[in-house]
Image: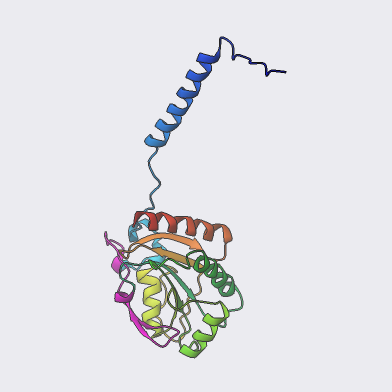
Amino acid sequence: MAAVKRGLGPWAPLAGFGAVVVAAVGVGTWMLTPARELPVFQPGDLNPAVVDAAVAHVEDHRVLPFKLINQMGDTVTEADVDGQIRVAAFFFTRCPTICPVMTSQMQRVAARFADEPRLRLLSHSVTPEADSVAVLAAYADRYGADPERWWFLTGPKPHIYALARRSYFACLDEGDGGLQDFVHTENLVLVDARGRLRGFYDGTSEQEVDQLMADLELLLDAD
């Protein structure tokens, strides 16, 4: 038996026109919706409790120069990360509470962007007197850290604490980096390729680290 041909009826032209209108509206809305951009954080945008008074009015803040030693025993400076997007963390290897969670979340970021040479993860020890190069190397191995992408850093305590407080604004602006001073923060800080602060995230929260990775994608796409 031959197949029966059925027409679409008198509403067929209107249905086609409606589909065209819906598609046009969708395209127009997409073209008019601005792409999401990450803010560039200046000291004045942040909680004053984390900002040193000496830099509170800076209008073009960049991460300050540094000179530290990584888990391979190499001396590294800001020149070694020039042009790279960075995620900075502050931890210590003997920490039994938030640090293992943060480092596991950093491990997720490292795995997601394992083949991205424009990204560098920086984990700064806040107990450098205890976290020697050998200790950091063992800790890095525990998390499968690729030294080409992820550095665990040690150096003079006052220098590291100044970076945490006056460069990354990762913790309260209190203390002088002396013997009794101690930084303990869950914050991860996103820094763009120009050394500008672009985001702050709770490194113990999977949801916030998911947002960090989404924001990283934005920066990489814009780079």
Q: Residue furthest top?
A: 10
Report x, y in % for residue 71: 45, 84
Q: In this view, does 129 lie above or below 147?
A: below
Q: In this view, does 93 lie above or below 206?
A: below
The front one of 177 and 108 is 108
Magenta segment boundaries in residue numbering: 54-80
Query: Which residue occupies 48% across, 79% down?
Result: 182
Location of residue 95 by image quarter: bottom right
13 left or right of 101 in image: left
Q: Residue furthest front?
A: 1
Location of residue 120 by image quarter: bottom left
Query: Which residue occupies 31% across, 67% down?
Result: 83
Say if residue 176 shows up in the picture.
no
Report x, y in % for residue 133: 46, 88
Q: Is residue 185 magenta?
A: no
Locate the C terminus by quadrant: bottom left
How did the renderer colour the structure? rainbow
Q: Is residue 223 above or below residue 24?
A: below
Query: Which residue occupies 47% across, 65% down?
Result: 113
Say if residue 214 shows up in the picture.
yes
Report x, y in % for residue 128: 45, 85
Q: Is residue 74 magenta?
A: yes
Report x, y in % for residue 114: 48, 68
Locate the N terminus by quadrant: top right
